């Protein structure tokens, strides 16, 4: 559901020339946090979706990342569905209720998602600041 770019479209930090490596590392962090924020937005938007095209309630999505060894930065390794069950609520009039009148809701806790979104935003901002500082250092080096 999320529009996460394939890892092949991101520039791996190790393939960036030496002076620009800092920008590549910060850029990989920006891409990873943007992917996390996209997944969190999907989770919040579908917090009440009890029926999907695949059948059953929406499943919370999480983005997995891994460090790039010896080069710095991170890479997006995939998007995982959380297999934990959602809340079972007694609502006999609901169109998705089972024979006993219970409805299975998504396993999305909006409060936790909001906290995760705040953390992802702060990490995104930190990477953006590091990118800007690296860019300014390169600009000043060119002025020498």
Image (spheres, rainbow, N blue to C red):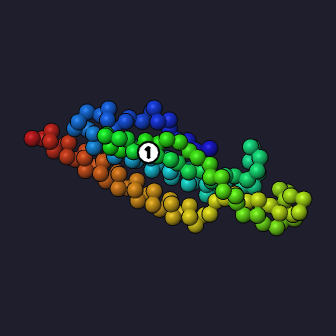
Residue 133 visible from this viewpoint? yes
Quadrant in the picture for residue 107: bottom right
Query: Where is residue 37 shown, x and y percent of the image?
Result: 51, 52
Which sits in the foreground, 74 or 125? Answer: 74
Q: Quadrant of the N terminus?
A: top right
Of helix, strand and loop, which one carries label 1? strand
Q: In which quarter of the image is the C terminus?
A: top left
Disc 1 crowd rating (10 Å Cα; few below 14, some 14-19, many 20+) is: few
* Residue sitting at x 31%, y 40%: 70
Which residue, given by chain and number where applicable, does mark 1 sit on?
Answer: 66
Query: Where is residue 55 shown, x and y percent of the image?
Result: 77, 46
* Residue sitting at x 15%, y 39%: 142
Which sits in the foreground, 46 or 105? Answer: 105
* Residue sitting at x 39%, y 47%: 29
Above or below for 58 versus 142: below
User: In the rendered view, does 65 fall on the left or right side of 47?
Assistant: left
Query: Where is residue 5 shown, x and y percent of the image?
Result: 50, 38
């Amino acid at each position: 559901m999320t529009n996460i770019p394939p890892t092949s479209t991101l520039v791996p930090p190790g393939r960036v020339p030496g002076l620009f490596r800092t920008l590549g590392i910060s850029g990989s962090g920006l891409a990873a946090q943007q992917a996390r924020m996209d997944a969190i937005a999907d989770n919040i938007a579908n917090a009440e979706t009890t029926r999907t095209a695949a059948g059953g309630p929406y499943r919370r999505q999480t983005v997995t990342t891994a460090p790039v060894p010896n080069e710095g930065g991170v890479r997006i390794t995939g998007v995982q569905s959380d297999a934990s069950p959602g809340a079972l609520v007694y609502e006999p009039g609901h169109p998705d209720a089972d024979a006993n009148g219970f409805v299975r809701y998504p396993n999305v806790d909006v409060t936790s998602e909001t906290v995760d979104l705040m953390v992802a935003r702060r990490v995104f901002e930190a990477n953006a600041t590091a990118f800007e500082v690296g860019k300014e250092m390169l600009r000043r080096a060119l002025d020498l």
